[in-house]
Every structure is written in C-alpha cells, then in structure tokens.
C-alpha cells in the first residue's frame, strides 16, 4: 500500500469519548491508512483532542474544523474534495463511535483494490441482519427502509443506508459532488444511487454493526423521514437528469 493510498474520513460532533481511540485503532492496522476528521465545532473539545494527537501522527492525521453543525452530507463532501486534492486512491467513510469495526477497513479496501469494486459497502443486511445492541424498532425501521429504497430506485443493494464505505477516487471524480443535495442520512442513499446511475460497480461486504457504547447517537425520526421522502425525489429527478458515466 502506498503511503497515501487510502484516507478514512470521520465526521465528528461531540465525540471526545471516542475520537482518540478510533484514530489509534485505524493507525494500528497492518495497512497504513490516513485519517481526516471533519469536526463541526464540537463544544466538547473533540477538535482539540485531534490536534493534540497530531503531534504523534503528524503525517497521517488531518483535521478540518467547521463552524457549527452543517450536516453529515456536507461534511463528507468537504472531505471528498480534500481527498481528491491530495490524490488518495481510496476514500473511506466511517463513524467515530466504533459502530464500524476499523478492522473491516481492510475488507473494504480489498474489495476495491483487488476484487473490482468501484464502491464497497460495509453491509449490515447482505448476509442476514448483523446488528448488535440496537432496539428492535430501530433495526426494523432501518431494514425495511432499505427494502423500500431498493423498490423505488431499482438498486440491487441490501443495505442502502449504510455509512461505512470505500470509494475508488474515480467515482468521486465522476459523480458531480456539487449536485449532491441531501445533508442527513438520505445523503448515504443519494451517493449510492448516483454511483449506480453513473455505471460504477458496487459490492457489498458483510460486516457486524455494533451500536455505540460511548457518547450520544445523532439519529432521529426526522433523519429517516428525510430518507423516505428523499428517495422519491431522487427517483423523480433521475428521470430528467443525464448522469456522467464511468470511463471504460
């Protein structure tokens, strides 16, 4: 793996309990990933923890600090553009709270680097329901939301709302990031759908999703509402839009 082969983007808001440990976990992997934290002005000092950690990992840990909460989608778009400017071949999305196992970064990287995927998704539902410590109501809501998205969009993806992913840089260079509209969890659906419409190869990699132990969840009913209604809007808009296509 080249020194700047892969970058893991981690958006944060009030993740002081997790951020140092998640960074150290990524840096302890046998492949040398870099980490870019996008912190939305966390009042709990998350940004300061990252900046202190940069003294130890100055060549591998980076941070962009933004003023206040601006949404998950805009955080990732900011990170994607930074990663492209710095010429990373593989760009990962990952949560700060250990709901995504850092060891699974290796599986996602392999799917893109060796197995032909343009987008690898860490999937909770591709091999059953692999979710730990979620309330049953939330599991059912997430699971059936993915079925609904599949029906509306036609995507053959079991976990359409997953937020643990690896993109080959060609995907992010192609899909017109400034046209990505949604800011909440509908952003995850929109990115997959746009990738799909641009003709890229998508592969699901089975993972076990573990609900956070430390810190507070950012999920809400409104997030799922945006996703449910946003899917219809995505499908409708796609009927009138020409998507740039993957270069052969």
Image (cartoon, rainbow, N blue to C red):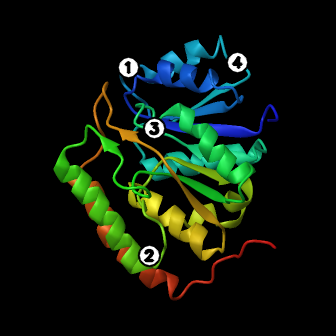
Q: Quadrant of the N terminus?
A: top right
Is residue 41 rendered to the left or right of residue 135? right
Circle 4 is placed at which residue position?
A: 58
Is residue 2 rendered to the left or right of residue 116? right
Residue sitting at x 51%, y 82%: 238
11 to 17, vertically: above or below: below
Q: Nearer the viewer, mark 4 or mark 3?
A: 3
Q: Please report contact status of discs 1 and 3: CB closer than 8 Å, yes or no.
A: no
Q: Please report contact status of discs 2 and 1: CB closer than 8 Å, yes or no.
A: no
Q: Nearer the viewer, mark 1 or mark 3?
A: 3
Circle 1 is placed at which residue position?
A: 17
Image quadrant where residue 88 sits: top right
- Of all residues, the one furthest to the bottom in this rendering is 240
Query: Any mark on residue 100, and which?
Result: 3
Q: Position of residue 175 (x, y in %)?
A: 65, 66
Is residue 140 rendered to the left or right of residue 97? left
């Amino acid at each position: 793996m080249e020194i700047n082969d892969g970058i893991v983007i981690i958006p944060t808001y009030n993740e002081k309990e997790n951020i140092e440990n998640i960074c150290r976990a990524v840096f302890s992997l046998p492949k040398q990933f870099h980490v870019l934290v996008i912190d939305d002005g966390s009042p709990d000092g998350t940004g300061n923890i990252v900046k202190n950690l940069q003294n130890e990992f100055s060549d591998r840990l980076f941070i962009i600090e933004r003023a206040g909460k601006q949404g998950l989608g805009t955080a990732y778009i900011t990170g994607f553009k930074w990663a492209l400017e710095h010429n990373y071949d593989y760009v990962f999305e990952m949560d700060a709270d250990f709901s995504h196992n850092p060891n699974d970064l290796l599986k996602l990287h392999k799917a893109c680097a060796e197995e032909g995927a343009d987008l690898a998704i860490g999937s909770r539902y591709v091999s059953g329901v692999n979710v730990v410590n979620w309330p049953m109501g939330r599991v059912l809501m997430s699971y059936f939301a993915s079925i609904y998205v599949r029906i509306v969009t036609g995507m053959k993806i079991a976990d359409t709302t997953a937020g643990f992913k690896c993109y080959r840089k060609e995907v992010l260079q192609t899909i017109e990031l400034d046209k990505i509209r949604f800011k909440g969890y509908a952003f995850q659906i929109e990115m997959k759908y746009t990738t799909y419409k641009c003709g890229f190869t998508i592969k699901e990699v089975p993972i076990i999703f573990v609900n956070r132990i430390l810190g507070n969840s950012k999920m809400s009913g409104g997030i799922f509402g945006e996703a449910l209604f946003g899917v219809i809007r995505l499908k409708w808009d796609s009927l009138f839009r020409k998507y740039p296509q993957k270069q052969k």
